[in-house]
Amino acid sequence: MPANFMFVSKNPIPGSMDDIDEDDDDENDALIPVPLKAAQGVKVGDKGSGVFRDALRLPDIGNANLGNDVADFADSEIRGPLIRPSALQRAAAPTSQAQPIQAEERSDAPVMSRAQALIASLLQPPDETHVSPKEGGEGREKPGAHTALHAEAPTQGRPRKTEETSDAPAVSRGQALISSLLQAPLDHRTELSSQQTSCGRVGGSGHIQGEGHQAQTRAPASQAQPQGSEAPTQVPLGEKTADRAEMVADLPVQPGSCEIQDGQNCRSGKQPRAIRPLDEVVHGVLRGSPRSCQLVAEALRVHGFCVCSGGLPLALVQRAQAEAEHIHSAGGMRAGTVVIEGKLLHERQQNRRGDSVLWLRSSGAIPSNPALSDVEAHLDCFGRTLGGSLASLDIPQGGARCGGVRFTERTDAMLACYPGGGAGYARHVDNADGDGRPDGRKVTMVYYMNHAWDQKAGGSLRIFFGREKRDLNLEHLMGGCRGVSFCPRGWGGRSCCSDGDARYLDVEPRADALVVFRSDIVPHEVMPAMAKRYAMSMWWLGYEQRSPT
Ligand SMILES: O=C(O)CCC(=O)C(=O)O
Ligand SMILES: [Fe+2]
């Protein structure tokens, strides 16, 4: 198992049009066009990238713009490397007890612990370091930081090649160290136990406290108590505050029910239900309401994606944004890369994405960034509960093969910054090829932290949901189900709509907006952003349930 977790694609090279099958073959369509609710301020069939501010009826998150502009390519490029957490329960530890990943599990553990300590020291909050941010993501550490870095670096015994040279400027060497460490992230992965589907309480902070949590910790003293540590935001899960999700959708969701109308596959015996429109937002999903999770699960099953608001306190999101800004301006992030078939694309092709990224926990950034840690924990909690909802959808019955999805693990949380200046990410599918494994990434979550985002700055996430084959990649999804009729509106379902136009939905990256979508089939694109744009992403891996033969 290589240290880096690479994702592969069948497409030989991104941008190559040769591989794109233009055949408009219904058999392979999965995402279904659904009736669009023009009455809600979302324009249907509107070309261009105008964003409709009130479309989602949500004051502080991204708006929707529906159009029928079809992107000119649909490659399935995917990015790597991906860091996986050592243990999900530890990853979700309360902020006040935030721990680095369990480096001791690896043979190079001491090396990584020291490296994490180094990185963490570079990623301390602004008031703990002396950084001169400058435009473009460069920064300077205080002299002391350099000294420490270079005193430590030669003793790291790092197995990886870095670009350090003896005559390189100190800052560059420091950044090279960070870069090299981030380039070869830990390959930690732990299965979710079946008991770990509820989050408990958030704000101590909704994090799951795994058994042996303390015992497994071997954090340097400097990390044991996060700097600038403050009481984590108290957002109790399951809190019976106004469940804003109720405001936008009142879809009865019954575990095990099925909306298949022809009854070919899912024979749950339940009545078909109305389909929730894709332009509706599920509000406050990070507050922990199981009901919200059910709505999101249902939307994923029906549409392949769901636009949500997290419902986290604005102050928390702003603090998280400030931490992200600090990390970025201190040079703690490196350019995102595009990997095809395990190989980094050539430099000139890397411009398909313009962001810089940091894998949070693996890099050691979590302990010294409590707000980001809190956001991560909320996403973790939500994902676990969502996993439970997904697993209970479409429970195979009567030999049906349209089972729900079961999460087995998740990736580390990835902090991303698009620095402005038109940076974006060309259209792609996160996991078009099952990550080369049967239980690859199934669901992507992207949480935005951009307070007072200016609509004119662009940067929307464009989600394609058309029915054209080139929008989809169902190869692996079909898997063992090839030859059988799939659940028409479920995971891996086929379209039953007569409208052949690919369509998209634009979501502004406003503070607290959260988009959840299927990693394996939903093409999406980050539109050029003219301002710094921050997001935290998390991917959930799993497998689709199959009925017993
Ligand atoms: O930041 C976003 O809106 C999505 C970024 C994305 O597609 C990715 O990182 O794979
Ligand atoms: Fe993506």
Image (tube, rainbow, N blue to C red):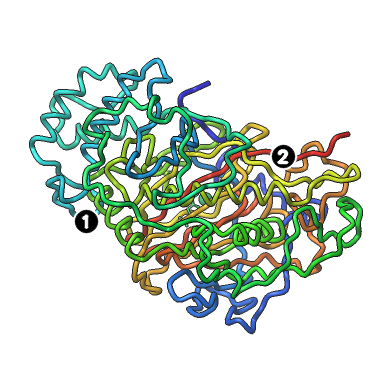
Q: Residue furthest front?
A: 240
Q: Is residue 193 visible?
A: yes
- Which x, y percent locates residue 192? 58, 35
Residue labelled 1 has its Cβ within 8 Å of some atom of ligand 1: no
Looking at the picture, which amino acid does disc 2 mark?
A: His
Q: Quadrant of residue 331?
A: top left
- Which x, y percent locates residue 375? 41, 52
Identify residue for label 1. 135
User: What is the CA distance from the residue labelled 1 to the residue labelled 2?
Assistant: 43 Å
Q: Residue at x 37, y 41 (%)?
A: 360
- Where's the C terminus, which quadrant? top right
Residue 194 left/right relative to 493:
left
Residue 91 left/right relative to 220:
right
Q: Residue at x 91, y 53 (%)?
A: 264
Q: Earlier in the sequence, mark 1 or mark 2?
A: 1
Q: Residue furthest bottom?
A: 39
